[in-house]
Image (tube, grey):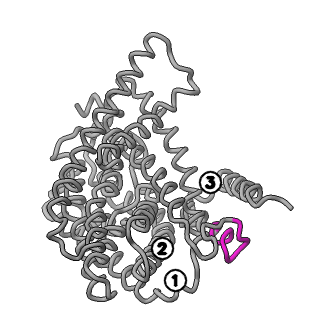
Amino acid sequence: MVDIYIIDLLVIGLLLLIVTLGSGWISRLPLSFALIYLVVGILLGPYGFGLIQLRRNDVFNAEVLEHITELVVIISVFSCGLKIVRPLKLGIWDITARLIGFLMPISILALAVVGKLFLGLDWGAAILLGAILAPTDPVLASEVQLTDTNDQDELRFGLTSEGGLNDALAFPFVYFGIYALKDSNWNNWLKSWLLVDLIWAIAAGIVMGIIVAKAVVWLDKKIQKQRPADNVMEDFIAISIIFLTYSLTEIVNGYGFLAVFVAGLVTQRSYHNPDKSLAQLGFIERVEKLLEVGTILLLGSILLLQPMLNYAAQSLLVIVLLFFVIRPVGVWISTIGKRPLNSYRRTLNPVTRWLFGWFGIRGVGSLYYLAYAFGNGLKGDTAEQIAWITYTTIVVSVIVHGISTTPLMKWYERNTAHDTKPHIPATIDELE
């Protein structure tokens, strides 16, 4: 009898071979690689060959899902940071500030209201649902993010920086929801939440991201002058920055996701040789793509038809409101008066605003927050309700956003090409 693990490796190997060799054709089709992985994951799950099992005797292993998605997210947000070469000035990051400072709270609050008024959740669970589903995903949204360090497109920059930051900055609201689930008297923990989980954790994340990245880059430069590292091993510097930054930040109770994104920004700016950052980015993106395969396969394997049908009406309500009302209206409000950097227009192109509203892709980040909540007090019927609404929302996002990404981005490039200025600074030297 052949071990199931060996069969899993065989199937994953065949999947990687097929999508790699067929990537030239797949990239032209109106579907994403994630959609392919999802379908294969379903075939490997309980409705197919039963080769991937996160459930044993009806007990779901949330810890495995939490750690896998955590690893994917930290690598992805570092990649987001490495892609961005814009100067750290508020005016240049205006779109990011609007998407994080206005859109994310609007999304969390609106989803919480939906949860309270229409889904029968108490305020704690409703806020937790909002915090799980509000962040956009930095992993599955790679097709609409910056393509490299020379890409200065406003839409891609906004979606990249939003995806890199909101997976971290939704964490205070996840904690808020978990605390409210455990203790409905907010006065017992609200002050601690403000001081520790909001102010301290964000500040610590920013500071640690700067310190650790600068320290590793300094050490790298110092040693490389004495004896250059092996070319094959040198790419692991980026992985070491990610792991050291994340772990040390979590030890001091900061937000590791935020720290790793900041570390990506700092690392990009710390090497005077642009080839170094580009090599790191290429390596990180390949690792990210490999981990994406595993995560979406797991998502497909944990889907069960009956629970999804039980919560289908509630899931549909959340999906329709989130995709077609909450996100688009929130974007429209958040971008009022926004003037693009790379255009002669006085206001953001309506096409760009509409696409900001549509490309609110949900994915691995939401899976991580859900798994984290499972391990920190979310249980019972409420856990089932939030879980299946979240799973269904991610699946629908993978499908509808995956199908629409390629044609919409081509349409966007055709309709906004005339807005661009003759020259946009593309290198770090030009930007500075």
Q: Residues within 10 Å of mark 2 (few under 14, many from 20)?
A: many
The image position of residue 148, as x and y in percent, is 42, 42
Instruction: Kindly indicate whether the residue at mark 2 contacts the one at mark 1 (C-beta within 8 angstroms).
Output: yes
Q: Which stretch appears magenta? A: 40-51
Q: Position of residue 363 (x, y in %)?
A: 45, 64
Query: In what element is the residue under mark 3?
Result: helix
In primary-sequence order, the first of circles 1 and 3 is 3
Q: Position of residue 268 (x, y in %)?
A: 35, 34
Determine the image quadrant of residue 430: top left
Foreground: disc 2 or disc 3: 2
Q: Is residue 264 above or below residue 61?
A: above
Q: Is residue 50 magenta?
A: yes
Q: Does residue 305 appear to the left or right of 367 in the view shown?
A: right
Residue most extreme to the top: 226
For the residue marked with disc 2, what is the amino acid? Tyr
Give the structural element (helix, strand or loop) at label 2.
helix
Q: Mark 1 sits on what residue?
A: 308
Q: Position of residue 280 (x, y in %)?
A: 47, 34
Instruction: Residue under label 2, please give it.
Output: 391
Three-letter residue code for mark 3: Ser
From the image, tell me which residue sits under label 3.
23
The earlier-in-sequence mark between 2 and 3 is 3
Q: Can residue 7 be seen here?
A: yes
Of 429 and 372, nearer the camera is 372
